[in-house]
Image (cartoon, rainbow, N blue to C red):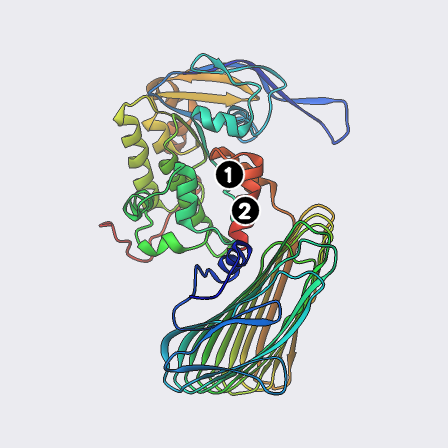
């Protein structure tokens, strides 16, 4: 169980300035085990910052972060990773010379047989075995590197997985596969929790728990049934405004059998 | 095997040429300016030069699947070893050549090895050349390696050269020259790591002479501490040819790297490109690996190892 108690995160308004801007404002939130939580809300509401604070990429100004009863507020990223927190980046880093297989092995913390690697990759729609020997560098497209990032998380299998906008840069077909993957991790019911930062309605609908974050505070929280109507998604659909739903075109046929 | 190799010798040979004991096939092991052991195979003949110190390596046409080892080790302080190794590779060969030099200097005087390697590659060959340079030793004596590599490729051949300088070489000036014949391709990969006050300079001139010849130069280097590196690769296109130069460097501490990739089109049909990048390790790379459970130091080492792999 993850408990966030009175979390505050402030940054200087400008570099060197003593005037502070509050990004997360006295936030208290509990994420129970075995739950799928989606954090949503407007841009600039503090969603990614909150995720980074949980992972330790940013340090809280005040407040406490408690994982399974242990206060991890002062722990480094590495220590938190070893406590069972995983983080899927919105824009993953690239590494010259690092093979996909190596990255998966670092994530898993052990040598992996080819078969396991291929399984992780096929779950994110990268089906060819050639992927294992490719480098995670600038030659990969944004969508490819994003899918590898998610495969890395699958290999790591953390107790608490945080994904920052996993759908960004991923095509619709892979997104279908991705929602299935999230659903199966969740349905496995082995104590794994997932926190996803997303605006995607389909991911939001999958959640046990939706947190609407606005101005650094929890504005609303509850089940999809309770929260969905308040997000304005239904209203938007009812208006029939064609500009809010961009058309996604599938020009080539995409195989679905791997 | 009657040859007496000390544990230091064996460890150097393992590092530079991945040799454990005496290799199979043709080889020539040189230590402190002297021949330690030589072996010829049915297709590869190694003989001592009569004009200069060094060896001639003759590979019969049609030789396939063989390896030649010609490592050099220097364990004597104050020694300057200059050696000329010339390869004559016949047509239709497919071989691997493993060279390299390891210096163990435990004293205060400089140890130096200057290897001048020349490769005359026949038609329709596939050659892989691996050269590793490495220095070690507790002494303050400099460990100097100044290799010169000359490559002459005939037509329709492919040659892949990997030149690697691992840790511990105080100073190096590398000269690499090649002329490439029609439809031949050279892939030159240079990987370099310098640290402390070390200096490294690499000058490369590749002349693409034949129609449809090509070259790819890939330089990956890491400069740590107060070390200095200079790269000066030049590709000259004299025919309808293709050349690509890529220099990437990671810089750490107070190190300096100067990269001057050059391309010169003599023929209007030459297609030449270069790119160069120097930068420190990106913070987001370290962060990413830390989220996978690595410490900051482990993450940095992992990034460097992969970059130089």
Question: Which quarter of the figure has residue A188?
Answer: top left
Residue A51 visible in the current orientation = no
Which residue is outermost to the front?
B2
Residue B102 x/y as whole percent: 58, 61
Q: Chain of mark 2?
A: B
| Residue B108 placement (x, y as % from top left) | 74, 55
* Position above or below: A133 against A36: below
Residue in the image at 77% along x and 29% along y: A16
Q: Position of residue B163 (x, y in %)?
A: 56, 66
Q: Circle 1 — which element?
A: helix
Closer to the camera in the image, A167 or B234: B234
Residue located 41% across and 84% down the image = B124
Q: Is residue B203 above or below residue B110?
A: below
- Residue at mark 1: B289
Residue occupied by mark 2: B303
Q: Is residue B243 visible?
A: yes
Q: Would you place residue A46 above or below residue B280 in this image?
A: above
The answer to whether marks 2 and 1 mark residues whose Cβ atoms lie closer than 8 Å is yes
Q: Position of residue B246 (x, y in %)?
A: 59, 65
- Which quadrant of the structure image shows residue B34? bottom right
């Amino acid at each position: 169980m993850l408990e966030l108690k009175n979390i505050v995160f402030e940054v200087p308004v400008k570099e060197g300035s003593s005037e502070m801007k509050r990004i997360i404002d006295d936030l208290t939130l509990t994420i129970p085990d075995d739950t799928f939580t989606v954090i949503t809300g407007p841009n600039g509401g503090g969603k990614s910052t909150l995720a980074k604070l949980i992972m330790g990429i940013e340090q809280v100004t005040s407040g406490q972060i408690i994982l399974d009863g242990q206060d991890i507020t002062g722990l480094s990223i590495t220590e938190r990773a070893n406590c069972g927190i995983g983080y899927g980046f919105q824009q993953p880093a690239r590494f010259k010379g690092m093979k996909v297989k190596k990255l998966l092995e670092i994530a898993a913390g052990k040598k992996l047989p080819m078969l396991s690697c291929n399984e992780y990759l096929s779950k994110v729609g990268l089906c060819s075995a050639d992927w294992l020997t490719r480098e995670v560098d600038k030659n990969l497209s944004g969508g490819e590197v994003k899918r590898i990032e998610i495969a890395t998380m699958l290999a790591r299998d953390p107790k608490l997985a945080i994904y920052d906008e996993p759908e960004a840069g991923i095509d619709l077909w892979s997104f279908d596969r991705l929602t299935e993957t999230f659903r199966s991790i969740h349905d496995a019911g082995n104590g794994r929790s997932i926190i996803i930062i997303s605006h995607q309605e389909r991911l939001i609908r999958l959640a046990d728990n939706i947190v609407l974050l606005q101005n650094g505070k929890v504005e609303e929280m509850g089940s999809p049934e309770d929260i969905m109507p308040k997000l304005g998604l239904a209203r938007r659909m009812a208006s029939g405004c064609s500009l809010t739903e961009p058309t996604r075109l599938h020009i080539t046929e995409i195989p679905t059998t791997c | 095997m009657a040859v007496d190799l000390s544990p230091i010798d064996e460890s150097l040979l393992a590092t530079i040429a991945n040799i454990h004991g005496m290799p199979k096939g043709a080889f020539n092991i040189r230590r402190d300016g002297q021949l330690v052991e030589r072996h010829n195979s049915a297709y590869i003949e190694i003989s001592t030069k009569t004009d200069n110190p060094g060896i001639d390596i003759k590979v019969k046409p049609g030789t396939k699947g063989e390896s030649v080892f010609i490592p050099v080790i220097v364990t004597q302080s104050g020694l300057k070893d200059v050696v000329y190794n010339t390869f004559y590779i016949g047509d239709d060969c497919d071989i691997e050549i493993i060279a390299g030099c390891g210096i163990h200097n435990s004293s205060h005087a400089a140890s130096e090895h200057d290897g001048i390697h020349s490769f005359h590659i026949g038609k329709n060959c596939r050659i892989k050349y691996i050269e590793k340079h490495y220095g070690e030793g507790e002494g303050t004596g400099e460990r100097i390696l100044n290799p010169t590599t000359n490559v002459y490729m005939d037509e329709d051949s492919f040659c892949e050269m990997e030149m690697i300088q691992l840790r511990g070489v105080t100073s190096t000036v590398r000269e690499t020259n090649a002329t490439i014949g029609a439809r031949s391709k050279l892939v030159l990969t240079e990987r370099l790591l310098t640290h402390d006050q070390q200096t490294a300079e690499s000058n490369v001139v590749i002349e693409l002479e034949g129609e449809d010849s090509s070259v790819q130069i890939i330089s990956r280097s890491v400069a740590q501490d107060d070390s200095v590196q200079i790269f000066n690769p030049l590709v000259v296109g004299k025919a309808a040819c293709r050349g690509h130069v890529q220099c990437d460097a990671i810089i750490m501490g107070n190190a300096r790297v100067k990269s001057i990739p050059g391309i010169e089109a003599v023929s209007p049909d030459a297609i030449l490109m270069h790119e160069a990048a120097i930068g420190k390790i990106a913070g987001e790379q370290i962060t990413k690996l830390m989220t996978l459970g690595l410490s900051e130091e482990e993450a940095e080492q992992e990034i460097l190892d992969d970059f130089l792999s």
